[in-house]
Every structure is written in C-alpha cells, then in structure tokens.
C-alpha cells in the first residue's frame, strides 16, 4: 500500500516536471483503452456527407451527433433551428453540475467545405475516409483500418472532408466529456454543447439562432474548438479571429465564345481583362493598391504585441514545407502579415485548360476574392473599397448579367456580387480571469510552450456571440496545421485527435 | 416544244441576271427533292462522337463516311493510316473522269473539338443533335426533326459538335457530288476526296499520311471546305491561313492549397502571379509587349491589299452582334488585326469559382496561350519569344513539376509546355489560272459579291500540302459565321448547308 502510494507520488512528480497533470494522464489512459471504439465512431461520422447545402445528409449528421450525445448521458439533447426553417440545425445538449455557478459552452461545427472529388488525390474520396501512414503527397501509404485495439500509430492520418475541420472538434469534445466522467472527475462548471451545421457556408443563420435561444445559451465563456494548432506543433490558445468578406467578379466580353483564329487580336479577351484588373489590386511587394485598404485598423496593445513576439517563428519551416522561397510581403513575418487586412484570390476561371482547352476567346472571366478583416475594419466598407477601385479602372459595375443596352453603352463591364455573409473580426482580452484559467488548463496538458495568439488568420463569426449573448469567446484549436482544410485531401493526424481530447478535457476540468 | 425552249431560255437569262447559273439551279432542285434523306443522314452522322482521342468512335465515323461514299458510287474508298498505327485515319475515295487531265482534291475533316457538355445550354447535348428555330441564346425554340419532305425552314439551326466544323463540310462535298452526277453533269476534272480525322487535334500525322500516300494524292489543287463564310453572310474564297502554336503555362506556389485565412497575405498566390504575368504580355492598346513579336512578318502584296479593301466592313455589325463596344486594338479593323500575329488566352484556371469556390490559396495557376502566326513567322521562334519574355519577368522556366531542390533554389517557378503540334501560315497567289477558275465558279452560285480573303484568321496546316505534294490550296468555307465552332453550342444554319452543297457542286463543275 505504501509502495503504491510512493509510486503514485513519483508519477505525480514526473507529471509536474513533464508539464502534464495526473488528471490528464488519467484521461489519456481512458482514451488508450477505448481507441478502437472512438475511431470506429469517427469513421462512421466522416462517412456522412456534410456540405451545408445538402440538407438530407446534414440531417443525418445531426442525428448522428444527437446519438453520440445521448450515449454519453448528455441532457436536453435537441436541434436548434432558426426561425427560417430548413437551415442546418445546431445540435445542442447540456450538463448541469451541482454547485457550479459558471457555464462553459463548447463549440464545434459539423459541416464542411464544398468538395470537388476530381481534385482529390487518386485513392481518396471525400466521404469515404481512408487511413494513410503519412501524407498522401509525400510517402504515405494507404492501409486498411486496423481491427484490434491499440494498433493506431499516432503519426497516421485519416483523410476525408471534415476530418479536421471540424468533425475532429465535435469528436474531441464529446470524447473528452466521456473520459472526464468515466475517469471520475467532476467539472467545476456547467457544460453546454453547441455544434453548428453551416459554419462553412458563412453561418448565415447563427444570429437568428443566438437571438431565438438566448436564454438557453447563457454562459460565461464559449470555447471554440476549430482550426489548426501552431505550425511548430505546439498547442495554442487564440483570443481573436479575423472577419471575412467575399466578392464574386465576372467580366463580360463577347456574348458568345469566339474562335481564337477568326477573332483573336480583335475581340476583347475577358481573361486578359481580368488578369489586368487583378494585377492592379496588389503590387509586387504584396501591398494592396486599393485606396484606403489599410485604414481603420486598430493597433495591437502592448500585451498583444508581447504575445506575438513570443510566438515561435515558423516562417522558414513553413517555406521549406510548402516549397516556396517567396512570401507576398517581403520582410514581414507570417504573424505580422496576418494582423493586416488581406485580399486573396480564392479562384479564377475563364475558358478551359488542360485536356478541355480549345481554340477560343472565352465570353466571360470570373474570380472569387476573399477579404479578411481585422479589428477596426468593417467588412462591408472593405468590400466597397474594392468596388470603388474596380470603377476607377474604367469598369461599369453591375449586379446582373448585362443587358443589350448596357453592352451597347459601356466599354468595360463587370458583374460584382458582394457576398452578403461577411462579418467583422473579434478579439477577447488576454487579461480577464477566465482567460487566465484557460491558459493554465491548456498548459496542464503539455510539456511544451503553449502559444498565445491575439488574432488568428482564420475567421469565425464570433462577434455574434459578443453581440447577442454578451459572452466571451476563446478559441482552442486541435488540428494539425498541414490538414488541407478547405481544400482537397483534408486530413487529421491521429495524434492531434488524441491531443485534442486531452485539451478539451483539461478545459472541462479547469479551475473556477 | 418551242414554248418550253422559250421558257428555258427565260430561266437562263434570269439566272445570269440573278448571278446564279442554270447548272446551280438544277443542283438546288435535286437538293430540294432530297432534303429529308440528306438531313436524316447528317443527323445520324452528328450522333457519332468525334473527338480525335476517342478512337472507337472515330472508327465509327470513318465507317459511316465510307458508307456514304460507296452509296454515291465513289471508287477506291479506303482508310489512309499513318505509319504510326492507331491514329484517326483519313477517309479517301476518288472518281476518274475520262478526258480529265487535272485533278481536284476536296478536303474536309470529320473530327471535332473536345466538349464539356456542362457548358452547353440546357437541352443541348453535343452528340445528340437538336433542331432549333433560331439561335438558342436568342429566341430559338427547340422543335422535333420534321418527318415530311420539304418542311425544313432554312433559317433553322442544327446544334451539335461538328455540325459546322466540319461534318457540314463532309456532308456538303458528298451531297454536291451526288447532285452533280444525278443531275447529269460531267466534271471536267478528276475528283479525289480526303476527309481527315484529327484536324482539331492539330493534324499530328498529316505529314506522315501525305508522305506515305504521295502518289495517290497527286493533284493540281486542294479545295479546303472548312470554316465560316464572311460575317456579312456573303460567300468567300480564302487563299491563305494563319499558322498556330500553343503554350501551356503553370505557375507553382505552395505545394498544397492553403487556408486563405491562416496564410492569406503571406503565402504567394499563384492566381495573382499569373494575372501579373499575363497582364505584362499585352498593353491596353492590344499591342503584344513581347520583344520581337511582330518581326519577320511579310508585308501584303498590292493585289492582297486591294482584296482586303474590298472586304465588306463588318466591325460595327459584329460588335453589335457580340454585344461589345471595345476591340483589342483600338482603330484597327478586324481584317487589319487578323493580318498580324496574335497572342490570345484560350483558358485560365486557378482554384475554383462559383459553387465550388472555397477559402483557399490555390497551389497552382494555369493558362493556355494560343499564338497565331502569319506568313514570315516561324511558329517555334514565336513560342520562344514568349518563353524569353517569361524569363525576363524573373521566372525559372521548367518543363516538369518542380523538384524540392528547384523549389528551394528559385523564387518564381513556371512550367511551360510548348505545343509540339504547331505549324506555319500558308498563302496561295490569287493570280494563277486555277485560282481564277475557283473565283469564277463560286461567283456562279451567288447574286452577291464573293469576298476574296488573302489570309483568314483561322488555321489549317496547309503548308504541309505545299511541302509534301507541291499542290496549291484554296479554302472555300460554308458555315454560318455565328456557328460557335470550337466552343459550346456549336451549330449550322440549314441555309448554309444548302448553299454549301451548291458551292461545292460549282467547283466540281468548274472550267478547266
């Protein structure tokens, strides 16, 4: 008995030295004993297509999550719909802990970005998850899912839409809760679960849902489990997000595609016009040339600047990993660049390339622009600056396909559709007590530095939570940084899923 | 009897005044009596997919044409293969006319440009031809093919790949021959038929075939039935074609697509790099900025300049029809522009647009450039000028996907694949006797001006015929100019098919 107590004590001391709390080791042990079941459930989850516009499959996803929650004894499991019917529902559930006076809401989303299966690597299929021994574009080998317990190598990856963004979040949160309870720990907070179904579509009904279910959703802090950990592999806590806005541009030339032999040199080429317009927007030094683009930005505070300084430099590592020598803004680090508003081309198309190419002058050319905004920017004002710039290049700007009369009147015609689903940036102070508790909890799971980020590059409509519920938000991401989220070949490194369970558990068990 | 002779005389005089010969009226009468059969055969022909790479369907097309020829009593019907087996064959046949000392070869091609059915207007299907009362993008209405004789309105159009480019050519030539023979006329020339099966793939084996079958293909003149009539609707005779060359460009940025939030502003965007590169190639006045691009051009002769002056001006009509106000080279007419070498973007793509758009920074950006060359230009020298220009913009130019080492060494990387199927321009003198006979024959079919064009905008590898067979070539096109060849919604206006039969018949009956 004494010997046992001594051993336990040694483990405890080792854990402290090692930066990981005994509670977290318990959580890890539970996960290790249940890996096969956790993984089987995750694979089934990933097999349900999850594009927000695909409502019948979205319903299947929601039902699957409700089942996951009920199996774990979570209460008041229900779907929250906006007043506008038909939108993907939020899956909600809660646990009231006797004696708890404060409440945490754990957020993740179960929908994924649209997919073009043809762009995925051969052998992969967005909604038929595959196990690979590494990265498919390096030396990863496809292998079958193992059937025995404890046989997952944590360096393996699971490929499929949502694997990291953000079904990994849902899975980590619910398995963390199960591990906490089954390991006999008592959370000091009430816990609510909020799983959104149209985040990748820009959360168009989140405001309605927050307004409609305002009393159900009362809390002190939302913990947002979405996005990747730091590129160094270290865990990170993120206090703010950029906002986001889009613009769809279509330049109109001839009414129909023309033979490039019979009309080349004479008929205007919309691809060339678009190239010229896009080239006018950003100079060779990555500076956006649109008037007033950097106005309105609120400077970082001293604490935020200090945190940024302590973020491990990853620029050289990332450049090597991505196979690039240049960055857009020469001399500026990734984190300096991200704390500026951005203009990025998501996609560009005119005519056809590759095997489908033909000797034509296309009729139109299209581009999708993505504008990220930082605290101080207004997303609609930012869109308007781009539109004003396009007008200054001599374009007639319209919101519809041009009529014959408009074609007859204007030399250069562009349709600009500003995305209506944009939103502003949001940032939580790093100095409030609950923020400090979060930092402490995440630190208890890792022997390494925990990176603190004032504002991350990605976007989530977190301003809505502040606006409708007066609650704070802090983002604690879990996915590997090279997860290909939002693109083909999305994947999660298994160790990141395991770490994510421990991180979420630490937050459920954190000090009040 | 006298009365009849008098009537015949009146008809003859009317014909002369009207510009149409009595022979042509006979041809027309025969066509009118056989419209339904001609059209049914044409529809069956268009229903066979005809992409050069689709070898089993190419074989079905070739067999169909052989059958058409045998049914018309044409002799020595056979397939001509290059030494390289497997390429689409030429379908050949001939008629030797006693007393004829000279030989004409009628050329058309039966393969079509690649199709992307998703880009065709709803209701259309590239290989399931449809009858429409006008243009589908105006007020044309889909109607079933009529089952009774003589019920085709000549303003109707048939939609399908190859409808105009160039199964209409094959159909016009073979039905012209049938009408000539069945109307009792005796051609003054021997006639050979040469139907190519990979023109739209750049005729990669035409040289081999011309070399291999040089003695079979001896002739005095090739008549090329391909391309559209003049935009005014007038018939035209074309004495030269531009040559053609391509370049496929791919700019490489990060090895994998990146999240535009997490990396936007920092990682290079290949779409923006491509936009900047393309914009550097041509200025706002349509002048190609690539060094030496306009060198080597042989100036037009006095006769050619005179012919160009007499070409009806169509610029204003075309601008109205195409819904454009601008042209690439301000102040220069279509015909002046076409007599210059051109640089045109056939297609451009990076990431996705529309419903497939996602918040990414794409990994690559691609464009296909089409270079048209005029007499004096060498197509490979012209490609090299573009490559030199790209190097001057700071790019490392490679012919393969970059290796890690190359990514580490070079800041801006582009893969350039120069098309190997290019060729030079070709031009036949307008003053030789056979050229004058052709002009006279085509004039006999029309009461309107026949437009004479020294060099048309489109391209055909006619220099090969000069090089291998020492024969002249003259192009006599028949398709409506708004036929959407090389793009979606390809169509033939039925009147153009009827006129094409008369034009081809006039050439088979022309003076020696």
Image (cartoon, coloured by chain):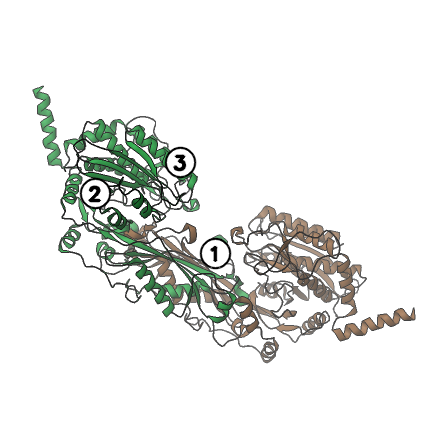
Chain colours: A brown, B green
Q: In what quadrant of the picture does the C terminus of chain A appear?
A: bottom right
The answer for how far apart the CA atoms under marks 3 and 2 are is 29 Å
* Badge 1 or badge 2: first in the primary sequence: 2
Q: Are marks 1 and 2 on the same chain?
A: yes
Q: Is residue B101 left or right of residue A378?
A: left
Label 1 element class? loop
Q: Is residue A306 left or right of residue B108?
A: right
Q: A173 above or below A359? A: below
Q: Position of residue A13 (x, y in %)?
A: 80, 74
Q: Position of residue A379 (x, y in %)?
A: 49, 65
Q: A13 above or below B129? A: below
Of marks 3 and 2, the one in the foreground: 2
Residue indicated by mark 1? B352
Residue indicated by mark 3? B60
Q: In what quadrant of the picture does the N terminus of chain A appear?
A: bottom right
Q: Nearer the viewer, residue A173 or B420?
A: B420
**Count of numbered circles in the view:** 3
User: Is residue A416 visible to the viewer in this orientation of the structure?
Assistant: no
Residue indicated by mark 2? B221
Label 2 element class? strand
Q: Position of residue A461 (x, y in %)?
A: 57, 63
Q: Position of residue B208 (x, y in %)?
A: 33, 47
Of marks 1 and 3, the one in the foreground: 3
Q: Chain of mark 2?
A: B
User: Is residue B361 visible to the viewer in this orientation of the structure?
Assistant: yes
- Near mark 3 (Cα within 10 A), the count class, few <14, some 14-19 or many ≥20, is some
Label 3 element class? helix
């Amino acid at each position: 008995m004494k010997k046992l107590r001594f051993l336990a004590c040694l483990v405890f001391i080792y854990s402290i030295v090692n930066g990981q709390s005994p509670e977290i080791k318990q959580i890890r042990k539970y996960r290790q004993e249940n890996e096969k079941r956790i993984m089987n459930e995750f694979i089934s989850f990933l097999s349900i297509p999850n594009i927000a516009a695909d409502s019948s499959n979205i319903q299947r996803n929601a039902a699957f999550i409700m089942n996951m929650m009920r199996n774990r004894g979570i209460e008041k499991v229900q779907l929250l719909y906006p007043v506008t019917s038909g939108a993907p529902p939020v899956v909600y559930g809660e646990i009231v802990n006797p004696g708890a006076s404060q409440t945490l809401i754990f957020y993740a989303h179960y929908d994924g970005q649209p997919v073009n299966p043809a762009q995925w690597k051969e052998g992969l299929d967005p909604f038929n998850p595959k196990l690979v021994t590494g990265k498919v574009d390096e030396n990863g080998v496809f292998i079958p899912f193992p059937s025995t317990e404890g046989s997952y190598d944590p360096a393996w990856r699971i490929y499929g839409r949502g694997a990291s963004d953000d079904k990994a979040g849902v899975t980590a949160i619910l398995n963390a809760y199960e591990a906490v309870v089954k390991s006999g720990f008592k959370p000091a907070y009430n816990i609510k679960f909020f799983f959104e179904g149209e985040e990748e579509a820009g959360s168009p009904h989140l405001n309605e849902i927050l307004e409609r279910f305002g009393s159900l959703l009362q809390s002190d802090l939302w913990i947002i489990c979405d996005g990747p950990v730091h590129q160094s592999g270290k865990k990170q806590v993120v206090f703010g997000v950029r906002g986001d806005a889009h613009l769809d541009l279509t330049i109109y030339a001839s009414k129909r595609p023309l033979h490039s032999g019979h009309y080349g040199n004479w008929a205007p080429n919309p691809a060339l016009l678009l190239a010229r317009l896009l080239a006018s927007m950003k100079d060779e030094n990555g500076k956006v040339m649109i008037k007033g683009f950097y106005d309105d930005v609120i400077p970082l505070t001293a604490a935020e600047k200090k945190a940024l300084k302590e973020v491990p430099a990853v620029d050289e590592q990332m450049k090597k990993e991505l196979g690039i020598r240049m960055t857009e803004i020469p001399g500026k680090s990734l984190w300096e660049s991200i704390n500026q508003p951005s203009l990025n081309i998501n996609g560009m198309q005119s005519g056809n390339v590759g095997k489908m190419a033909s000797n034509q002058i296309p009729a139109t050319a299209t581009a999708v622009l993505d504008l990220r905004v930082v605290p101080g920017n207004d997303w609609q004002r930012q869109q308007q600056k781009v539109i004003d710039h396009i007008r200054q290049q001599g374009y007639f700007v319209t919101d519809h396909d041009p009529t014959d009369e408009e074609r007859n009147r204007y030399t250069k015609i562009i349709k600009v559709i500003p995305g209506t689903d944009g939103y502003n940036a949001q940032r939580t102070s790093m100095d409030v007590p609950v923020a400090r508790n979060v930092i402490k909890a995440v630190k208890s799971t890792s022997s390494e530095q925990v990176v603190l980020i004032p504002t991350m590059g990605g976007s989530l409509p977190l301003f809505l939570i502040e606006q409708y519920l007066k609650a704070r938000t802090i983002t604690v991401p879990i996915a590997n940084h090279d997860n290909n989220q939002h693109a083909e070949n999305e994947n999660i490194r298994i160790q990141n899923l395991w770490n994510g369970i421990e991180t979420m558990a630490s937050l459920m068990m954190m000090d009040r």
